[in-house]
Amino acid sequence: FIRCFQSLIESEENILIISSDNFDKSRATDLIEYYESFMKADGIITIGLNVTEKRGYKVPIVSVFSNSFLKTDTVVVDFNDALFKAVKLLDSLGHKNIVFLSENLTKVKEEQYKKAMKGINNNRTNIIRSDYRFEKAGGDGIDKLLKSGLEFSAVICAYDNIAIGAVKELKRNGLCVPDDVSVIGFDNISSGYYAETALTTIDSKQKEVCAAAWELLKQKIDNPYKCKRYNKIINAELVVRESVSKFKTNKKTHCKS
């Protein structure tokens, strides 16, 4: 997403400055105040901001993927329909025990998963949450799942990096994807497409999100007296690839790690 924003913003001869709050709410607030008051930024785009303040700011701000109470324009991706299609696909292929692999910063998607499962009249919801992030969270999640004794034939992962780690750990334990376990991720990152088994995923529409956020920000920069707040909703899309197949009741195959 940062590369996408950089391409859009710098193509119009603007300067992009990037900072990370490392998921620290107080640091996020400090950074916004720093860029507003000290750096005199023309505009700010936040990604995944999670603050509880309800104050407004003089500088135009657009929030993307944010659980934020800031008085800002927002661009959000609606994953609900795509996630419902994902569980519906798995259900149509005979998968009834569908597990969600999560981590501490993806709890919102856990609720979306529960809602989607109810949508296909399946109350067999199981969530495995890791204290790690990225690929390590996927490996840890599969390790916990295998040790739990829960029956499962499919996993949905909170984002693609988790799915990639999950596939590797499944293979390390002699389970093949998708012959033994079907796997679905979120975000549609490029490494998922180029994986040994191309990853089925829910596309978060990166280019559309970035373009919408940049257009909203430009409108506010060009017209600072434009007070109306905008909430742009972009619908995610299920992308079906090789990591999903029919549920098989026969003996498990063995995959070399």
Image (spheres, rainbow, N blue to C red):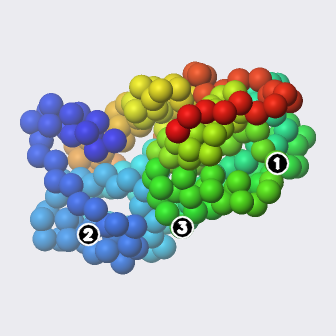
Residue named by callout 3: 131
The residue shown at (68%, 49%) is 100
The residue shown at (43%, 56%) is 48
Q: Tell me, yes or no, if residue 85 can be seen here.
A: no
Q: Is residue 86 shown above or below 48? A: above
Helix or strand or loop: what does disc 3 sit on?
loop
Q: Which quarter of the figure is the N terminus placed in?
A: top left
Q: Nearer the viewer, residue 146 or 185?
A: 146
Q: Residues within 10 Å of mark 1 (few under 14, many from 20)?
A: few
Residue 159 image offset from top left, x and y in percent: 52, 45
Badge 2 amino acid: Leu
Residue 4 image offset from top left, x and y in percent: 28, 36
Q: Is residue 148 shown above or below 254? A: below
Q: Residues within 10 Å of mark 3 (few under 14, many from 20)?
A: few
Task: Tell which circle, 2 or 1, labels the residue nearer the N-terminal end.
Answer: 2
Residue named by callout 1: 151
| Mark linked to residue 31 | 2
The residue shown at (28%, 62%) is 20
